[in-house]
Image: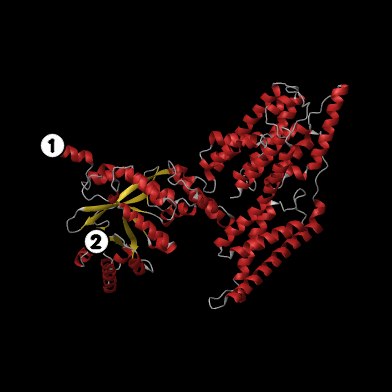
Amino acid sequence: MALPVSLIATFCNLIAFLAEESGHTSISLTVGYVGQMTGHIFPILLNIYLATYVSSIRRLPKAASISCSLAVFFIASQQWGLISPVIPLPNNFAISLLSAYVTCILIDKIQKLRCFSFSDYSNAVDNSAKMIMICILALGGVLSFFFLIELIFSRYFIQFIYLPELDPTSFYDGLLYEFIRGLLWSIGINGHNVLHMFKTELYDITISNMADWNNFGTDLNIISTNFYDFFTGMGGSGNTLSLVLCILLFSKNKSYRILAKTVLILSIFNINEPVLYGVPIIFNPIMIVPFLLVPMLSFVLAYGAIYIGIIPPLSVVQSWIVPPVISGYLATGGGIVTPLFQIALILLGIAAYYPFFKLMDRRSSGLDLSSIFNNRFFNDDEIATRSRLTSFIPSLQSNLDAQKEVESLQSNGTFLLHYQPQIDIKTQDVTGLEVLIRYRTKGGKIKPPYFLPSFSQLGLMPELDFWVLENAVKESEPYAGSPGFCLSVNVSPETVLTNGFVKSLRQTIAQSALEFHQIEIEITEELLIKDEVKTAKIITQLQTLGISVALDDFGTGYSSLAYLSRFDFDKIKIDRSLVLNLDTERGKSLFGVVVQLGRIAKAKIVVEGIETQKDLAFIAEIGVRYVQGYYYYKPMPLAELEAGGVLSSSEKRVSSEGELG
């Protein structure tokens, strides 16, 4: 969510550098300041976004949660000395996230205490006073917690923690420096800033060494100030130019490819913050491994190549922002071997990043697990945003479990569609087909949709629903000319309420041989509860197109009667649970009442779950004409329905008419 801020900041820094190089100092200073300010806003936005998210899922007052979280972040950062020396703002990502999460959790706990609970009968002043007290207690509690941590840390642990004294020209110390720098970055701390004394000392040593080399022919040191920039920091810390190229070459995830295209120009100039936050690498146990491994491997290879004479030592100091390959050419006085060696390191980095990124590509917190299907049906970002939000701490384990199940489905079988006819018991004609998703294992076993909760957890129900719809429409096209043919599709509330639902549905039908009146959308009471106003608009839009709308599972909800008076449904489907009670007089009476309600609403009534002659006889006795259930047909593929004479494709009808002629 905060990634655009990072992109703005880094582009400003790049423009400032280019302006400085071209002699426009005033522009460079102004744009550079904007970049620095924008970059320092990033951890503040992280704090706000996480506080907003946690407060929404725990039903906390957002304004109070955000205010307290920000106050804790600023005060704790000041207390721990984590204010940026460049611009006086807190800049620690770990503290930003921790302060937001802990503050919201504490507000939630305090709010549940009886003395602080809100009452509908209390006036606004009393409730406001309670909220102020809750905020004060939460603020004091979190700050006390942070103060206690600082006290324990400073008294008992700080004496055991120290940065080693590193020799800037030593192979082992240089390798250790590279590891520590990457490790700090992986937890959101700018490793270069923490270890700036090392680079400052190395810069002084390099300038002196190059002067002696020019004046007295002294041997050049293998490790110089640009050694890290040109061999272990191509694209930024972690040699992340390799990662960006890996994404461009191999990612199946549309979001990642867009990110890579956006940040490529920045990576060429060795700026990588957007990649660190966008893939992400920070706080990511998967990507931390190659992020640490690739630059250390590059360090060893570059040191060895210079040591044995394959490439010359760097003899000219260049800016860290000079692009790879060009930097190697300039820093060795125009030699071609060093640029080629840099290219080899980039390719090696791509190979090292590849297996880890592919794992991310598959398991990326719902970013695009819908690649199981052929394409996306919605063009807006709402689905992807909901999917990303499920990856936060409160639902992390559930999200991982859901990802595992979806990936297992992808690798161990295929989705397919079955259809169950709806029958007119007076004429015995098929009046419609309800499409149902099924799963076939590699062993050929057909399973019901037990996986729906996992798709819902990942925010992918819209993808699944439209996969069903599009494939059902394709499979049904040969039967479009059948008299009375109607395709009934169950759609989840998440799908119906997604922006662009009606537009996408209209396009899918318009591009097929089916007519709008041959499609029926089934919705449940859950959708009406979620957003009654928006649902009413969508139902009207569907019926205006000629698409029928059916209320599914009628008789199982608490508010079915109320919704019948507010919405004009074309069809009402009585749930099987009511059929199961027809062996008692009470069950029959209740069933009769539900049928009467449907008639008052002037909707077509279909009874689901008819399996016995006794059930069918009672249904016919009370005057219901349309049923669906195993008594007539179980769900099966269209080919089996055609083979059984239930359906007739256009090709067979044409052939039959030709024979009669």
Residue beneath disc 2: 612
The amino acid on which the numbered mark 1 sits, given as a three-letter code, is Glu
State left or right for residue 227 relative to residue 355. right
Q: Quadrant of residue 64?
A: bottom right
Per the model, the C-alpha gap separating discs 2 and 1 is 39 Å
The residue at 62%/35% (across/down) is 265
Q: Is mark 2 on a helix, strand or loop?
A: loop
Measured as percent of width and height from the top left, residue 184 is found at: 71, 45
Q: What element carries label 1?
A: helix
Q: Does residue 118 lie above or below 553 as drawn?
A: below
Residue type, numbered disc 2: Thr
Number of numbered markers: 2
Residue in the foreground of this view, choosing between 578 and 320: 320
The quadrant in which residue 410 appears is top left
Residue 446 visible at all: no
Query: Which mark, residue 1?
Result: none
- The residue singled out by tag 1 in the image is 659
Q: Quick one: 245 or 549, which is closer to the camera?
A: 549
Tell me where residue 512 appears, x and y as whole percent: 31, 42
Q: Is residue 343 above or below residue 647?
A: above
Is 482 or 3 nearer to us in this picture? 3
**Neighbour class for label 1 at 10 Å: few (<14), some, many (≥20)?**
few
Q: Can residue 478 be seen in this view?
A: yes
In the image, farthest residue toward the right: 216
Q: Which color scheme does this rendered protein use? A: secondary structure
Residue at 44 percent of width and 42 percent of height: 375
From the viewer's perspective, is residue 128 above or below residue 462? below
For the C terminus, which image quadrant? top left
State the residue at coordinates (23%, 53%): 431
